[in-house]
Image (tube, rainbow, N blue to C red):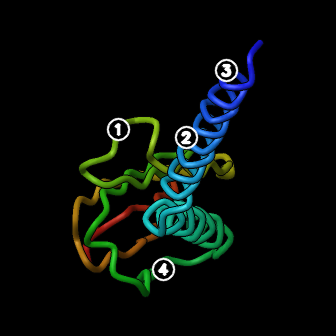
Amino acid sequence: MKRGESVLLMIFELLAVVVIILITISIAKAFSSDEGINKIKISQDLGMMVNLLAGIPDNSLVKYPYDVSKYTILLDSEKVVVKTDEDQNFVRSTYRFILPEGYIADGFISQKANICFKKENTKENKRIALLEC
């Protein structure tokens, strides 16, 4: 290999390394966006609130203290899902939990600022509902 060819090969190698580094940094920034972290924290908060309500013996009404108007929230008896309208299925945040026997959890809220959980004890079942406050 001639000297000119080795210099040219080295320049292409350096360019390839720089491109790979830039791609890696852009992917890392996309995954570490504040929006993704917020969805994870909100889903964890809401899931823990459901667990807490399941442990309270009486009827209760609890308001979530933060604005969730950017998010769509789905609650069922196994999980809480938080996503934005622009999200695809793989970008949503899901927090799974286990309710005691006889409990039902349900609710759907889309882009509402204030949300509440309402626990109702009846003879038939114990229900935790996601509602707009």
Give the number of the disc on residue 88.
1
Distance between mark 2 and mark 1 Cα atoms: 27 Å
Instruction: Name the front one of labels 4 and 3.
Output: 3
Q: Earlier in the sequence, mark 4 or mark 2?
A: 2
Name the residue that disc number 4 marks. 60
Q: Nearer the viewer, mark 1 or mark 4?
A: 1
Residue at (58, 53) in percent of width and height: 25
Q: Are marks 1 and 4 in contact (CB under 8 Å)?
A: no
Gap in angstroms between the C-alphas marked 4 and 2: 55 Å
The three-letter amino acid code for the residue at tag 1 is: Gln
Q: Give the mark nearest the N terminus, 1 or 4.
A: 4
Is residue 125 shown above or below 55?
Answer: above
Label 3, label 2: how far apart the Cα atoms are: 21 Å
Residue drawn 37% across the image and 63% down it: 130
**Closest to the observer: 86 or 96?**
86
Q: Nearer the viewer, residue 110 or 86?
A: 86
Q: Amino acid at mark 2?
A: Val
x, y percent for residue 103: 56, 51
The quarter holding residue 6 reads top right
- Which label lies toward us, 3 or 1? 3
Image side of residue 29 versus residue 82, left or right? right
Q: Is 67 in front, or is 9?
A: 9
**Within 10 Å of the Cα at label 2, are there few (<14), some (14-19), or many (20+) other Cα atoms?**
few
| Front disc: 3 or 2 | 3
What is the number of the mark on residue 5? 3
Q: Secondary structure at mark 2?
A: helix
Q: Earlier in the sequence, mark 3 or mark 2?
A: 3
Front tag of 4 and 2: 2
